[in-house]
Amino acid sequence: MADSSGLTEFWARCRVQVPGLPAALPDAWPFGATAAHADELLGLVIAGTKTGTATSIWDAETTGEQLPEVGDYSIILDGAGEPRAVIRTTALATVPFDRVTAEHAHSEGEGDRTLADWRATHEHYWRSYAASPRGFAPDMPILCERFELIWAPGTDPAGHTNGKLG
């Protein structure tokens, strides 16, 4: 995993490419629960397919994870813990799991992008990896987050690929 100097260097590179970003280093985290899943989801973010994510409020309460706020920046790590992209939270909504919308499911960019697939995949995820002892329930509170890609090496400042990554 990148040490704080690696994160600081990455953030400095991002700030050169995207003027006006705050000096404070944002939180850094990977998507998913495994290295392979982190890499897969990161690829979807960089491709512009994944513009949404979901967090179990129960898990955040259990771990003490600070929930995002609209306008927050995040450094997204790959499966090896290296910084690879910067996103900015654009919208948030807390809803029960069984009330997550088809539009949100599509924004997550996974599987066939349907609500049925999202529900099956995320139920399995929270049954397998929940930090909360409550695990999974159909009415569990979910924070649906929308975000935009701000920058990744090999993309222009709007997040569009320029034919190379790295």
Image (tube, rainbow, N blue to C red):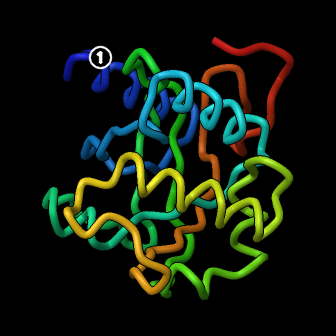
Relative height, residue 98 to residue 2 (above, below) = below
State the residue in front, 145 or 120. Answer: 120
Q: Residue at x 70, y 15 (%)?
A: 165
Quadrant of the rendered structure where residue 127 is? bottom left
In the rendered image, the quadrant that contains the N terminus is top left
Q: Position of residue 17 (x, y in %)?
A: 57, 32
Q: Which residue is mark 1?
A: 2
- The answer to which quarter of the image holds residue 15 is top left
Query: Which amino acid is tagged 1?
Result: Ala
* Circle 1 SS class: loop
The C terminus: image quadrant: top right
Residue 120 horizontal/vertical position (percent): 65, 60
Q: Is residue 57 left or right of residue 21?
A: left
Indicate left or right for 166 with 58 as reference.
Answer: right
Relative vertical location of residue 91 with respect to residue 158 in this rendering, above or below? below
Which residue shows up at 58% across the image and 25% down it? 39
- Please give the name of the residue rendered at 82% of the width and 58% of the height, measured from the top-left corner: 113
Position of 40 with respect to 96 (left or right) is right
- Identify the residue at image location x=43%, y=49%: 21
Residue 112, x across and y down, in percent = 86, 52
Q: Is residue 49 left or right of residue 75?
A: right
